[in-house]
Image (cartoon, rainbow, N blue to C red):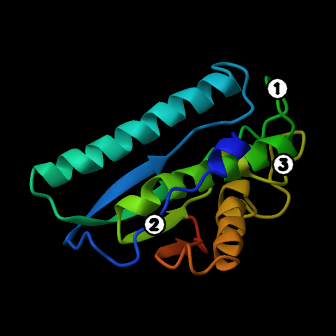
């Protein structure tokens, strides 16, 4: 998956889409590492979903919708984070989650003038759980938002390619866009 995500499609030199409408792409409950559906099946299904998302965007444009922006919104629980029923350790889960977020950005990057990557924390992303399910620091100490911070650092390192990508990391449990 990481190798697949590293493939970068060519980008246009200027804003060409124009518009007054945004599309939402929700990333939710991947629970990467969980054995129930399986990691490989989750990745394959998400690849199909990304292809469907681009097709949907194109169909909206054919119907006359002037879409120039997409909001990529993490709804939480991108990794499993629980101590049972997993086939990937946390480092593997986190690396895969970032690769999938990266692939999502790369998939839509050639198709819109602006991308906003954002999200909210989920319970599976809570970083400091005790054995009794209690959070030791804060529920905002969360891998779901950590991935957003890391992606922002990655995009900042290649400002030219990602100049139309904005990352918003929430500072509370709620996020208004």
Q: Nearer the viewer, mark 3 or mark 1?
A: 1
Q: Nearer the viewer, mark 2 or mark 3?
A: 2
**How far separated are the C-alphas under marks 3 and 1?**
20 Å
Q: Are marks 2 and 1 in contact (CB under 8 Å)?
A: no
Of label 3 and label 1, which has the lower sequence position? 1
Task: Specify the quadrant of the image occupied by residue 170.
Answer: bottom right
Q: Is residue 130 above or below residue 41?
A: below
Q: Name the residue beneath numbered marker 2.
A: 11
Task: Specify the quadrant of the image occupied by residue 64.
Answer: bottom left
Which residue appears at 77% of the width and 42% of the height? 93
Q: Which mark is residue 129?
A: 3
**How far separated are the C-alphas under marks 2 and 1?**
36 Å
Which of the image's four quarters has the C terminus? bottom left
Could you say which is closer to the camera, residue 52 or residue 3?
3
Where residue 74 appears, as percent x and y from the top left, is 53, 54
Of label 2 and label 1, which has the lower sequence position? 2
Where residue 167 appears, as percent x and y from the top left, is 55, 72
């Amino acid at each position: 998956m990481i190798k697949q995500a590293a493939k970068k499609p060519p980008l246009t030199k200027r804003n060409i889409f124009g518009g007054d409408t945004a599309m939402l792409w929700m990333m939710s409950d991947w629970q990467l590492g969980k054995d129930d559906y399986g990691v490989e099946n989750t990745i394959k299904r998400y690849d199909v979903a990304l292809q469907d998302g681009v097709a949907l965007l194109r169909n909206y444009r054919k119907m006359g919708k002037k879409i120039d922006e997409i909001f990529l919104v993490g709804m939480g629980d991108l990794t499993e984070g629980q101590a049972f029923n997993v086939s990937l350790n946390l480092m593997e889960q986190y690396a895969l989650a970032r690769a999938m977020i990266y692939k999502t950005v790369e998939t839509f990057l050639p198709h819109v003038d602006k991308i906003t990557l954002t999200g909210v924390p989920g319970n599976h992303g809570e970083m400091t759980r005790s054995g009794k399910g209690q959070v030791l620091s804060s529920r905002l100490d969360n891998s779901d938002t950590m991935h957003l911070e890391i992606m922002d650092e990655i995009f900042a390192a290649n400002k030219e390619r990602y100049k139309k990508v904005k990352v918003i990391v929430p500072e509370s449990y709620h996020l208004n866009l």
